[in-house]
Image (cartoon, rainbow, N blue to C red):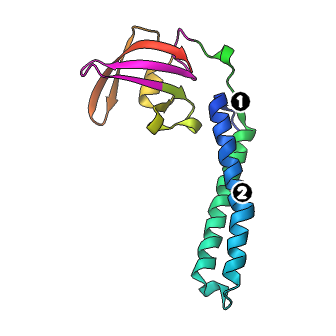
Amino acid sequence: MAQEILLTREGYERKKGELEKQERILYQEIPEKLRLAKEHGGDLRENKEYVYLKEEQEFVEQEVRRLRELLENARIISDEDIRSDEVGIGTTVLLEDVATKELTPYKLVSSAEVDLLNNQIGVDSPVGAALMGLSKGQSIVVQAPAGRLRYRILGIERS
């Protein structure tokens, strides 16, 4: 039996959109491109465009299978499951870097939803794991490649 994957509503919708996009590529765009590549004639094994498209088709098929499995095994976290007094999946945490006084909001998500460019960190990442279950005002120390980082939790809210 496959492992249950926790997703926020936003993350579920984003993955569903990714699946729809990949299915469109797999079932509409690639077949049309393959048809056009075949029209060039000759031995298909020597048709670089055709060979490349077959490789792309295989890659997209794998991605479609991965996304379908993820969505089939997903459980959407309800708003009732997300607390605002304790750090957990689905919460946004305002952290202060104790050394630099820099403030950064981080949303804690499952590993399937991580998006570092948008400050969405996994609950299984070093910072995410250290934050789990803590409350406003508490501090953490995390060992990172750049050294030991110390953060203070200034706020927690439902995302």
Viewer-nearest residue: 46 or 124: 46
Which portion, as a residue range, is magenta? Answer: 84-106
Vertical comparison of 153 with 7: above or below: above
Q: Nearer the viewer, residue 128 or 25?
A: 25
Q: Position of residue 48 (x, y in %)?
A: 57, 81
Q: For the point 32% across and 29% down, which residue is it?
A: 143
Task: Indicate which disc residue 75 carries.
Answer: 1
Count residues near mark 1 (Cα–Cα under 10 Å), then give few for <14, some for 14-19, many for 20+.
some
Please, what secondary structure does the residue beneath circle 1 have? strand
Q: Is 98 colored magenta in this rendering?
A: yes
Residue drawn at (63%, 85%) of the image: 45
Q: Which label sits on residue 24?
A: 2
Left or right: 149, with 134 as reference point: left
Q: State whether residue 104 is above or below residue 62.
A: above
Q: Is residue 139 magenta?
A: no
Q: Secondary structure at mark 2?
A: helix
